Amino acid sequence: MIRAWKECGANPASQHSPGRNARRVLEDAREGIAKLLGAKTGGMDADQLIFTSGGTEANNLALLGLITPPPAKEDQTGRKYLFGAELVVSAAEHPSVFAAAHELVRRGMRVHVALAMDHENKFRDEFIAKLDHLAQLCSVMLANNETGVVHPISKITDACHERNTIIHTDAVQAVGKIRVDFRELGVDAMTVAPHKFHGPLGIGGLVVRHGLELQPQLFGGFQQGGLRPGTENVALAVGFFEALRLAVAEMPERAERMRSLRDGLERRLREEVPEVVIIGENVPRLPGTSCVSFPGLDRQALVMALDLAGVACSTGSACASGSSEPSPTLVAMGLAEGVIRGAIRLSLGALTTATEVEEAAHRIIKAVKHLQSKK
């Protein structure tokens, strides 16, 4: 990234030599990222990778850009309204997906929100039945941002294809941690953001299947085929590519190390606090995510106590961490109120050490017991 900032400072949309050099570097990064994500990069049916400012923008571009608004009709009073253009989303999506869905509702389109998975991490028939409402688009995340649970989306993908419904997946949490192949997943659009695998903040991407019509949500330039105008940041794209390259190359080692550390952390917590609930422990999860609950404690009080103790954790999504409302994901899972109220998320990275995990476990246990003693 430093080299890109030094050598590629020109606008990659410019026609002069420095601009053309920046364009080459940018497009090399774009192609490299697309290949690592399993997108098709050559031939007449090549897929697209559209750079965005992050996962939130990519999710918005997918949901708002892949639905074609129906023509407005007039009722008996002459008021124009929309009908149709249905969207189906799971009840455990990232806040950026819900916010985009709410915007579609504001625009007069129908949105169905339903619990997608049962307690065994299998897609519920009731959710798939929602697609029979002639849905244009379905959005289901690949791995949950709070629990780390990895969803087997092949069934929902097949169901969407059978009904000619476009399928989008938010894969931000999964990419770089488990193997993700766009073409093998069979989805039509996929969101990714590199800061989840030690890449730079401020950039994300939306992979779009060849031939899929996407409507831009920003206007003012011709960059990226006009689908996402604005001057591309070459250095961030280079950092995205390099971080993904390293994550994919080191994935087996990273995943095994994080999984071992996570399991050790959860085992240590259970030894000292037997009533702890480890959410999603019996289904496939991302290797570095642990959602644990201490029933009887208040999650906000616990987060503050742990912050004072030097342990960084969160409740729910960081994008909704300022909310005092219970986690929609945990509520949708049907967990007991006490479990929801006492749940926090702990995340491990590729650079996390065993010493750090042991110290974190010690501080978490101490904070939990202190809060329990005050009840």
Image (cartoon, rainbow, N blue to C red):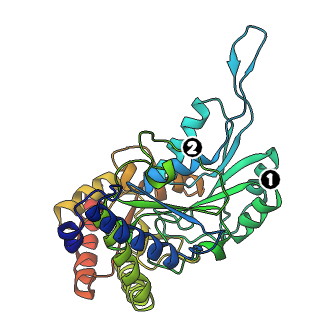
Q: Could you tell me which residue is drawn at 68 percent across and 64 percent down?
A: 118
Of labels 2 and 1, the one closer to you? 2
- Picture quadrant where residue 264 is located: bottom left
SS type, badge 2 = helix
Q: Is residue 340 above or below residue 71?
A: below
- Picture quadrant where residue 40 is located: bottom right
Q: Position of residue 190 (x, y in %)?
A: 56, 63
Q: Which residue is mark 2?
A: 64
Residue type highlighted by circle 2: Leu
SS type, badge 1 = helix
Of residues 44 and 333, the one drawn nearer to the viewer in this rendering: 44
Of residues 300 and 135, the one drawn nearer to the viewer in this rendering: 135
Q: Is residue 187 above or below residue 349?
A: above
Of residues 80 and 374, the one drawn nearer to the viewer in this rendering: 80
Residue type highlighted by circle 1: Ala
Q: Which residue is mark 1?
A: 129
Q: Is residue 223 above or below residue 172?
A: above
